[in-house]
Image: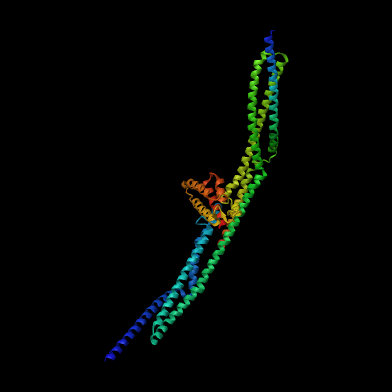
Amino acid sequence: MDATTNQINDDKKKEAEELKARLNSLTDDIVKKREEFKKNTDSIAEKIENEPKIIEEEAGEEAEIEKMEKEIDSESNAVITELVDKE
Amino acid sequence: MGKLENFGKSALEVGRKIHGGAKDAVERARMLGRDVAQSETFINASEVVGKWKDQKVEDFKDWKDQAKDSLKIQTVEKWRMLTDRGLDNCLINLKDQDIKKVESEMKGVEAEIAGLKKEEGTIEASVDKINNPEMKRLLEQKTSDMKAKLKERLEYLEQTQMQELRDRKDKYLEEKESLNGKVNNLEENFSGRIDGKIEDIKNRYGLQEKIEDSKRLGEDIGNLRTSIKDSEKSLAEDTKTFSELRKHLTGSDLKDLDDMLKKAGNELRENKRELFRKETAKNKLDQQVETINRKTGKWEKMKDKYGLGNKNEAASSTARPQENPSGNLWNGVSEDEYVDADMETMKKIEDLCLYRNSSKLQGNFNEIQQSVKQLDVNNPVRKLVEKMGTPKDMKASMLKIRNFVRTVKEAYE
């Protein structure tokens, strides 16, 4: 093995070490990012799971609106009837 | 002969004058007699009251029919008959018409009183002109009966009929005020309750928190996606470097790098799964926000349907600009001028809202959007229209704006 070959091997080894360092850093960064964002997701996901079943209650709104419309009708009738009775 | 002739001429002249005065007085008396004769038909008080009652029944027949019919119509139409003063058949407007009718009748009676008084004065003045005592006595005798009837008619008009009309007017005003109060209470009650329902839904399901969580997740998703792309790029470059290096490497270096690349790849895949979890959570949150908005939207729609939008907001606002620290001027304009300018613009906006013809809706709405820019930045009408953007239901929005303008105008007045 001549001096040139030895030099090349040393360079490649050095390159391999640098690559290892980069890969380590990259992996750490990937894990760190995930952990960082995971916190938000977990707390929000937990909240979503504990939510009351909104969609199931959809029909309740219609019934309440209908009930209020009946009240409006009844209150309007009372005012109109009172007016007519006065005449 | 000359003296006798002159005396004769003078006597003739005096006679002519007496005859002329008497003729005039007789003519006046004749005219008075005609008026009194016409008035006699009304003098019987019971007859007059009877006629008045008939008229009253006739006047209110339409009103009562409309009021009764309104009980059978749809709730929303009935509500509008009570609350929408822009409608001809709005019951409050009909009360206004009643008031105007009475006022018109009062003017008629006042004119009749003034006419009769003038005529009475003219007759007396004509009788006063007569110098001949005998002629004067005869004329006074002839007109005394007529004057008595005239006096009776005047007393009836002044004391009975005018009082009845005043009582009627007071009654209508009282009824209008009472109706206004009732309608305002109803509007405030239902508007407040609907607002309460909307707030309750928002609080019950934590709408604001969900919106904020979704926003936070959205930001996280964006950042994580960028991070993944960057990592993918780095990993691809490192993989390429490793491919070039591997023929020069042996033993543990080769194995270590191979393991490290696999590990980085696995962690990256885990981040992609995390991204997917975040996107799923955001979708779920957004769906919940949408559902909550749909629920509140139903109440908002009801508010629009019944023209109850922003009743409370408008009622609670004085809508008057605050005085600036330097005194009673606002941008160099007195507060009254300032308010007048806003009132004029609001009147224009109110008129624009009245055109419900569908072909004009878009054009009028565009003009309303332009007009609000002339209003003070704190004017609630301006805020409402600007917040509205371009509404889906243009007709309902026009109604909402008009009701709101009316409330703000009342606050300004």
From the viewer's perspective, is residue B111 above or below residue B340? below
Where in the figure is residue B174, as x and y percent of width and height?
57, 64
Position of the N terminus of chain B by quadrant? bottom left
Left or right for B140, reference B413: left
Residue farthest right in this picture: B252
On screen, residue A35 above or below B74: above
Q: Residue at x 64, y 15 (%)?
A: B244
Task: Judge by depth and name the residue closer to the eye, B281 or A83.
Answer: B281
Q: Quadrant of the C terminus of chain B?
A: bottom right
Seen as rendered, the residue at the extreme front is B326
Q: Residue furthest top?
A: A1
Residue B220 coordinates in the image, percent (x, y): 65, 33
What residue lies at 65% left-to-right and 20% top-to-bottom?
A: B238
Residue B260: quadrant of the picture: top right
| Badge count | 0
Color style of the picture: rainbow
Q: Position of residue B51 (x, y in %)?
A: 48, 70
**What residue occupies the far bottom of the structure in this picture?**
B1
- Can residue B72 be seen at all in this image of the molecule? no
Asked whether residue B241 appears in the rendered view, the answer is yes
Asked whether B203 or A76 is in front, the reply is B203
Q: Relative to B258, is B402 on the left or the right?
A: left
Seen at 39% across and 78% down, the residue is B28
Residue B305 screen position, x and y as percent: 56, 49
